[in-house]
Image (cartoon, rainbow, N blue to C red):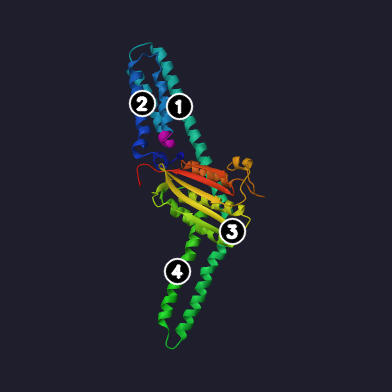
Amino acid sequence: MTPPSEHHGWRAYAEASPLGPTARWLLPLTSVVLTGLIFVADTITDYEIAAATFYVIVVLLASRFCGMRALLGVAGACIALTLLSYFLTHDGNFHTGIVNTAISILAISAVAWLAVRSGQAQARANVAQAQLARVTRITTLGGMGAAIAHEVNQPLAAIVANASACRRWLAASPPRLERIAATVGDIADDANRASAIIARVRSLMSNAAPRRQFADVNDTIRQAAALMEPQLRARSIDLHLLAGADIPEIMIDPVQIQQVMLNLLVNASEAIDHTRGEIAIETRLIQNRVVVTVADNGHGLTPQQLAAMFEPFHSTKEGGMGMGLAICRSIIEAHGGIIEADAREHGLVVTISLPLAHGGNG
């Protein structure tokens, strides 16, 4: 589960949680029930029993689903209940009760402060990781720049040629209106094709915050494959996509999943240094998980390289940063998934397993 940011508490928790709607309410409900039990226990027991210190458990639970302000509110409520219990208690040593109450308040305050600081540190780490992921996306697209430019130039050149043809047919006597109408349709199709390529590149280069939504994994993979198609064609590599027909929409960040697929496709293409190169992508539904495999017939990896494949700063490419696959693993794990690689006789197979989101869309 992706930790909530310091400002978006319950909403971020609810959106990021891989659990169903009923399970998502379990943690807050447990916190409320536990708070009531602690209050009753602290009130009916003697001053010498510092039951209020158990409020630290409530604060720790709240840190899992509350933002910073809400967490401080929970801590404040626990302190208020501690004081109220002190005044409602009538048995035991009064001065000992003062000491125990002070200790409980200090414990609640200290845990709340540590939880807030931990949340702020996690939020800063998330921002840094998102920026690093964006830099990696831009670096990947930079290496594909020539192929993308070539792909955009094709529809633009077709538009220019068709526009020139329309001008000639307009100048004819009489004007060839039926040919003009058909060619204008071709111009619109080519313009839409160029626009789609540019839109895909812009979405991958955007600095928008990660956003989960129900999305079709097959469509997400197709968009990434469309960006890689020119580069693969230039290297005479065949790309086969075997999309499972029974796969429901799942809760993912499409841009991040596209980034993972782009990185895997780039690595697979660079591992193929011979003719008749092939890359196969297959999606399947296996035991309530969406499984995506990317297989190539490249030179493969040694057992040592395979073991360190997803480690940061490990790269088998000259001049590589060694962060691409590490970020891929981080993205997949943040989605509650698993990514792993296995060698085969000729090439490599990377397997991604993503859980189905319960409580909606299958």
| Residue lying farthest to the bottom in this orientation | 173
Q: Which of marks 2 and 1 is in front?
A: 2
What amino acid type should be assigned to the residue bearing mark 4?
Asp
Residue 214 coordinates in the image, percent (x, y):
40, 49
Mark earlier in primary sequence (3, 2) = 2
What amino acid type should be assigned to the residue bearing mark 1?
Ser
On residue 131, the disc is none
**Cα distance, mark 4 to mark 3?**
32 Å
**Cα distance, mark 1 to mark 4?**
63 Å
Mark earlier in primary sequence (4, 3) = 4
Left/right of residue 9 with respect to residue 350 in the rendered view: left
Residue at horizontal 44%, vertical 55%?
219
Q: What stretch is highlighted in magenta?
A: 64-71
Whether residue 10 appears in this view of the structure is yes
On residue 109, the disc is 1
On residue 189, the disc is 4
**Cα distance, mark 2 to mark 1?**
18 Å
Q: Nearer the viewer, mark 1 or mark 4?
A: 4
Q: Quadrant for the N terminus, please.
A: top left
**Is-magenta flag for residue 314?**
no
**Is-magenta flag for residue 69?**
yes
Residue at horizontal 45%, vertical 19%?
103
On residue 276, the disc is 3
Residue at horizontal 37%, vertical 28%?
77
Residue 338 coordinates in the image, percent (x, y):
49, 41
Residue 307 coordinates in the image, percent (x, y):
60, 40
Mark earlier in primary sequence (4, 2) = 2
For label 2, the crowd category at 10 Å Cα-Cα, with few meaning under 14, some 14 to 19 and many 20 or more, is some
| Residue lying farthest to the right in this orientation | 318
